[in-house]
Image (tube, rainbow, N blue to C red):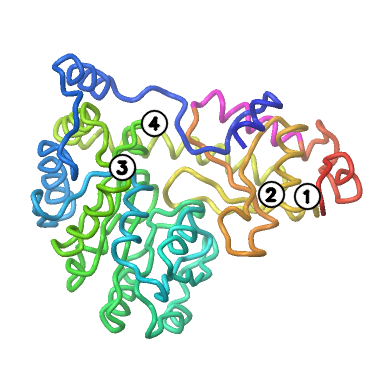
Amino acid sequence: MTRLAREYNSLNLAQGFPNWPCPDLLKDAAMKAISENINQYAITWGAQRLREALARKYSGWYGMNVDPAEEITVTCGATEAMISTMLALVEPGDEVIIAEPFYENYGPDAALSGARPVYFPMPPGKPMDLDLLRATFRPSTRAIVVNTPSNPAGRVLTRAELETIRDLCIQHDAIAITDEIYEHIRYEGEHIPIASLEGMKDRTVTISGASKTFSVTGWRIGWAIAPREMTDAIRKVHDFLTVGAPAPLQEAVALALDELPRTFYGELADSYRKSRDSLVGALIDAGFECQSPEGAYYVLADFSSLSDLDDTAFAIWLSREVGVTPVPGSSFFGPGGGQNLVRFAFCKTVDVIEEAAKRLRDIKRGGVGMAPRNEDVAARSGLQQ
């Protein structure tokens, strides 16, 4: 979709990367590390300084006692942490429960590990159906992927929801693999790492990273925190996949974790809240149906009152005719799902969000013509309907 945005000179609200610079502290620290010749391999499972900074962070923020020597693996982004964890801990024939909609890598990660993804519906803006979740766990369930705050739906799971997942993991001897990359981009609720709940430290892999919090999506610094036995397995897979994350950038992230004040994280969430409110208001005014996300920086919007095109055709039309590019909703669902949805990212500067809001409102005003129906656009798009 980023290529499509470039082709049509459209505002790219598809790919989830900020369009502003990261904090100077990180840039200065990275340049200093390079100038001091920290340019060779770090320890495969992560520079000691970063692992110690992470242990301090999880102790200070969440009261988690983490051993930096034996329970932390630094990876090439949270995405690599997830596939390393799956390959290390999931066996062929296992089942992995994944809440739907989901970040698009989770299903393929499970499949690459030989497991069967089992999708559990969790519609945006609605509480988790705990009875359905209980029925989804089976003897073959090895793991559940927990993403909070979530991409693309923006859910922040409640303590009661997390405690139910905890109880089911213990009952079925399953593990929780969490993706907490948006932990500090939150507008409602609290972030509760499931590993911090009683009984879950020894059956949880906590995954996060620097990409979203510090606006460095291209640095690829992530981590997985797990008990020693799980960490041993994850480190073996990580070593063969990538050897190690970039050494000078690890030094910069360690400094940021230690030195950025807590006010930084509050200001980060506040800035995103303004963009969220602006975009959600424009989408509703334009005729979309959507819920205001509780966390992360995406809005999943239903366009079915505007058009009967499928999600891909509608996203192409929106990019070409309106000048705003989203991601087709089916990217975040199993087969057949999400075809009336598109996802917008609001991790963009105020000027971009305001211009996107103006263009979207023009749909309802008729400034770009009526939103398309199948018979109007299918032939022109060259798409199979």
Q: Outermost residue toward the top?
A: 35
Q: Which of marks 2 and 1 is nearer the N terminus?
A: 2
Which SS class for mark 2? loop
Q: Name the residue under label 2.
A: 288
Residue 160 horizontal/vertical position (percent)? 33, 71
**Residue sitting at x 86%, y 51%:** 374
Mark 2 Cα-neighbour bin, 10 Å: few <14, some 14–19, many ≥20: many
Q: Which of label 3 and label 4 is nearer to you?
A: 3
Which comes sooner in the sequence, label 2 or label 3? 3
Q: Position of residue 154 (x, y in %)?
A: 47, 53
**Which numbered disc, 1 or 4, marks the residue that appears first in the sequence?**
4
Question: Which label was assigned to residue 242?
Answer: 3
Q: What stretch is highlighted in magenta?
A: 349-362
Quadrant location of the C terminus in the rendered image: bottom right
Q: In this view, does 240 lie above or below 264?
A: below
| Pointer 4 residue | 218
Query: Which numbered tag is attached to residue 306?
Result: 1
How far across and down, in percent of the image, does residue 301 sit?
Answer: 62, 51
Label 1 secondary element:
loop
| Label located before the other in sequence (2 or 4) | 4
**Which sits in the foreground, 38 or 304?**
38
Q: Is tag 1's residue or tag 3's residue first in the polypeptide sequence?
A: 3
